[in-house]
Image (tube, rainbow, N blue to C red):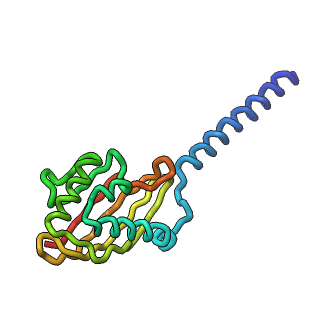
């Protein structure tokens, strides 16, 4: 009689450990809240955004290459088909904007959110495009890849 009770207790303990292991694995893979608020993220990423702007002002888009992932994409109404796929196409599109007289006078993070190895930054940019003053917004979706934060998706919009 004591053998089945021991067996039952062992099963309960092993099963409980199994469930606890699954719960811990899920909570570490998918945290609901990283504990980092938007203001803290803005302070962390504003220097990177400033460096992006400085690189843009060199008028050589290849200097922006280090900010983008290999599979990056750029989405805008000013791009044929509304989207550029791939690092080379994104950089070429940025160079086209620079060659067309594009400037970015201000680039400021308005809000930021994070989850695991992903960050989203909503930015305001003020500058010029095609001889027109612009006040637009840009959404940067960034991913930590090999310890570096890289832009995987950039979406821009300008009020027409």
- Quarter of the picture containing the N terminus is top right
Q: How many marks?
A: 0
Q: Depth check: 16 or 25 in front?
A: 25
Q: Is 21 in front, or is 48?
A: 48
Q: Is residue 80 above or below residue 127?
A: above
Residue under the point 28% across and 77% down: 105
Q: Image check: 10 left or right of 123? A: right
Q: Quadrant of residue 48?
A: bottom left
Identify whether 159 is placed above or below 17. Answer: below
| Residue 151 is at least partly visible in this image | no
Place of residue 58 in the rendered image (x, y in percent of width and height, measured from the top left):
29, 66
**56 relative to 31 in the view: left or right:** left
Q: Nearer the viewer, residue 96 or 155?
A: 96
Query: Which residue occupies 12% across, 70% down?
Result: 130
Q: Identify the residue at image location x=49%, y=68%.
A: 44
Residue 59 visible in image: yes
| Image point (40%, 54%), residue name | 150
Q: Position of residue 144 (x, y in %)?
A: 46, 52
Q: Quadrant of the C terminus?
A: bottom left
Instruction: Depth check: give the residue in front, 134 or 58.
Output: 58
For residue 132, above or below residue 139? below
Image coords of residue 85 (percent x, y): 24, 47
């Amino acid at each position: 009689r004591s053998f089945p009770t021991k067996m039952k207790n062992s099963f309960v303990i092993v099963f409980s450990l199994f469930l606890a292991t699954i719960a811990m694995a899920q909570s570490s893979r998918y945290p609901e809240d990283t504990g980092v608020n938007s203001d803290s993220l803005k302070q962390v990423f504003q220097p990177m955004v400033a460096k992006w702007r400085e690189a843009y002002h060199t008028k050589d888009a290849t200097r922006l290459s280090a900010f983008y992932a290999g599979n990056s994409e750029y989405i805008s109404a000013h791009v044929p088909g509304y989207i550029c796929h791939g690092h080379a196409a994104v950089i070429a599109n940025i160079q086209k904007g620079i060659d067309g007289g594009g400037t970015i006078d201000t680039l400021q993070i308005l809000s930021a959110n994070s989850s695991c190895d992903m960050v989203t930054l909503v930015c305001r940019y003020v500058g010029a495009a095609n001889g027109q003053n612009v006040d637009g917004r840009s959404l940067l979706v960034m991913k930590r890849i090999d310890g570096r934060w890289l832009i995987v998706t950039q979406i821009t919009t300008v009020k027409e």
